[in-house]
Amino acid sequence: MANPLLAVNFLADAALVNNRLVKFGSGDRNVTTAAAATDFLVGVVNEAPYGVAAGERVDVVRQGIAWVECGTAVPRGSPVTADSLGRVIVAAPAAGANVRIIGFADEAGVNPGDVIRLHISPSVMQG
C-alpha cells in the first residue's frame, strides 16, 4: 500500500508515465521524466492508471511511500536513483562521483518493469 504524505502539483513538460521518477523541467513549476543518476530528482508520478500528457497538470509524490517502476533488479532497502527512462535502479556511484538518490526500496523488485514501494528520502550519495 502506498502512503503519499506530500503530493505537489506541477505542469508536465512532456508526457509522463505513471510510477516513474521526474526531475525539474523548463520552469519553476514544471517537471519532466528523470533520465540520469545526476538529475535533480523531484519525486514520483502516481497518476493511475496511465500518467499524463504534455502540458497537463500532474501531482508528484514528494514525501512518503509511493509506487515506482524498476529498471533492473532492486534489492529491498537499496538506495535508488533514476535510469534513462525514469525507472529506479540501485545507486552505485563510482569512487569520488556523486549521484542523487530519490530514496530507498521498501520491497524487492526482481525484474525490470516490477512495481515496488519506494520510501522517498531524497539526498546525494558519493562513491
Image (tube, helix red, strand yellow):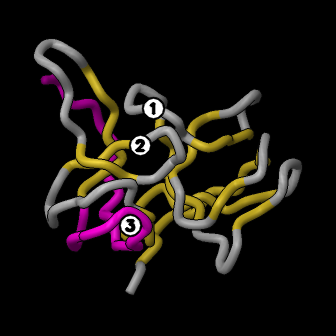
Residue occupying image coordinates x 54% and y 40%: 34
The disc labelled 2 sits on which kind of residue?
A: Ala
Alpha carbon distance from label 3 to label 2: 18 Å
Query: Mark 1 and 2 residues: CB-CB less than 8 Å, in contact?
Result: yes
Dot 3 crowding, Cα within 10 Å, few <14, some 14–19, many 20+: some
| Residue with the mark numbered 1 | 36
- Reply yes or no: does residue 125 show up in magenta: yes
Earlier in the chain: of badge 3 and badge 2, it is 3
What is the secondary structure assignment of the residue under circle 1?
loop
Earlier in the chain: of badge 1 and badge 3, it is 1
Query: Which residue reaches farthest right?
Result: 55
Q: In this figure, what is the number of numbered marks?
A: 3
For residue 57, side relative to residue 119 (left or right):
right
Magenta region: which residues? 105-127
What is the secondary structure assignment of the residue under circle 2?
strand
Residue occupying image coordinates x 35% and y 73%: 116
Q: Is residue 124 above or below residue 52?
A: above
| Residue with the mark numbered 3 | 64
For residue 86, side relative to residue 25 (left or right):
left
Earlier in the chain: of badge 1 and badge 2, it is 1
Q: Is residue 93 above or below residue 55?
A: above
For residue 57, side relative to residue 62 (left or right):
right
